[in-house]
Image (spheres, coloured by chain):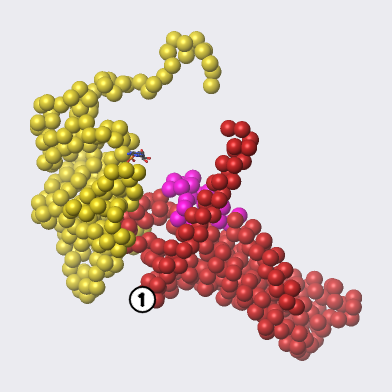
Chain colours: A red, B yellow
Amino acid sequence: MGPFQRLGHAALGVLERLGRGHLFLFRTLLAMGTLVRRPGLLVRELYSVGVLSLLIIAVSGLFVGMVLGYQGYITLVDFGAAEALGTVVALSLVRELGPVVTALLFAGRAGSALTAEIGLMKATEQLSSMEMMAVDPYKRVIAPRFLAGVISLPLLAAIFSAVGVAGGYFIGVGVLGVDAGAYWSQMQASVDFREDVMSGVIKSLVFGVVAAWIAVFEGYDATPTSEGVSRATTRTVVHTALAILALDFILTGLMFGDI
Amino acid sequence: MGPSGTGKTTLLRLIGGQLRPDHGQVLVEGQDVHRLSRRELYRLRRRMGMLFQSGALLTDLNVFDNVAFPIRENTRLPEPLVRNLVLMKLEAVGLRGAVSLMPSELSGGMARRVALARAIALDPMLMMYDEPFTGLDPITMGVIVSLIRRLNDALEMTSIVVSHDVAEAGSIADWVYLISEGRVMDAGPPQQLRREASDWSRQFLEGLPDGPVPFHYPAPDYLDDLMGGDTR
Ligand SMILES: Nc1ncnc2c1ncn2[C@@H]1O[C@H](COP(=O)(O)OP(=O)(O)O)[C@@H](O)[C@H]1O
Ligand SMILES: [Mg+2]
């Protein structure tokens, strides 16, 4: 094969995968109805996808908030505006770091686990055997895991931001001596619910869909061997990270235009 | 029966509607499997059971829940009835005592028997077995061989057993098809097949290393190769 043929071959491969990914998403959405009748399936996945990610999200949020407390203070104190620390910490977290860092951590903690689990179920013929038992894996396996990811990520992002604000408070007020009242009141006065909080929520919803979609698709599409599953798991983390960062840029640009 | 890689598993997957043929059709009870709607296909699959080579038990459920899985998913039977059904199926394969074990705690033979109990949970009319004898010790193998025949007769099923274990498959089969390279090479009752088989079938049935199927994978001339014709 010449270089052009190889390029064309690779491009076709990418397009084909994209197509399969969209068909997969479509079938997953069609299978979602089952979850209304059997919420128990969703609850179990919410636990393993969401609840088990709580600790890493809370700890990371705390550290990021504390770092923001230091860095914000250094910049602000030069302008004599150290009281605005609460605003800086909250805005950075709610608008940007909460959704993005949560999504990146989510890809590493929950996304990779979802891919590996589904990929191994495929490799050990559990998915095939379900089909032969007249049980649709999209309904029984894929849809609950996908929806659990979509629901969990925004909630985890909110927790990340909340813990981060507390971390910033701990450093700013507790260590650096910013006035406690000023920290909260400035934050309350300048963080706007519609513009700031909603933009963060929209971002984390979009990230939730993308991260969960990539994770379950990579698992379902994995080559059914141990090597295939390991490669799919890596791809989940890499592709999710790239997709999140690119989408963050696009979404920020779009929402920036409105302001 | 047929050598590895000739499409035996593929054939079973075609019958179960998991693969789509490029051409030709598969009829099960007169229905063309690949013309059915999803809903009809799933209804048909409720009457088919398949035992996978690996057993394919759901690793996050214990033995009881694995056998109960198809019953719970496909019917709305009350739980006491499900329990009775599961215990009956497990009793049939001799593993009623193992209800609370996890799949990781089972030996290969036990896992296959649990998978067998699960496959017959909905009383199928057609059972498919993919190489049920491979990788088993002689005792377990004997158990599985007789189980397949006894279940077939007791539940009045049709059983398709894919295998390359000539003696075991021959001992319980009513009819044998020998397939190779996607074609039926020979067919008939096992005794008749042994008497009047073609050269190829004789090689397969008697396990001769050389014959119509050559011992050597196609290769360039031996002498040329040794003299270093072209190096790879
Ligand atoms: N009729 C066929 N058409 C296309 N591919 C086939 C056919 N039969 C077998 N194969 C391919 O050959 C490989 C081995 O087939 P398989 O069914 O696993 O063999 P067996 O179970 O007899 O060892 C599979 O990858 C399958 O895709
Ligand atoms: Mg096979």
Amino acid type of the residue tagged 1 in the rendering: Arg
* Residue B47 to residue A167: above or below: above
Magenta stretch: residue A223 in it?
yes
Q: Position of residue B156 (x, y in %)?
A: 11, 54
Q: Residue at x 35, y 44 (%)?
A: B22
The kind of secondary structure element at disc 1 is helix
Left or right, A193 with reference to B76: right
Q: Residue at x 34, y 49 (%)?
A: B19
Q: Residue at x 62, y 74 (%)?
A: A202
Left or right, A77 with reference to A256: right
Dominant secondary-structure state across the stretch colored magenta: helix
Q: Residue at x 62, y 60 (%)?
A: A243
Q: Position of residue A246 (x, y in %)?
A: 67, 61
**According to the image, label 1 marks what residue?**
A37
Image quarter where the C terminus of chain A lies is: bottom right
Examine the image and state in which quarter residue B133 appears: top left
Magenta stretch: residue B127 in it?
no
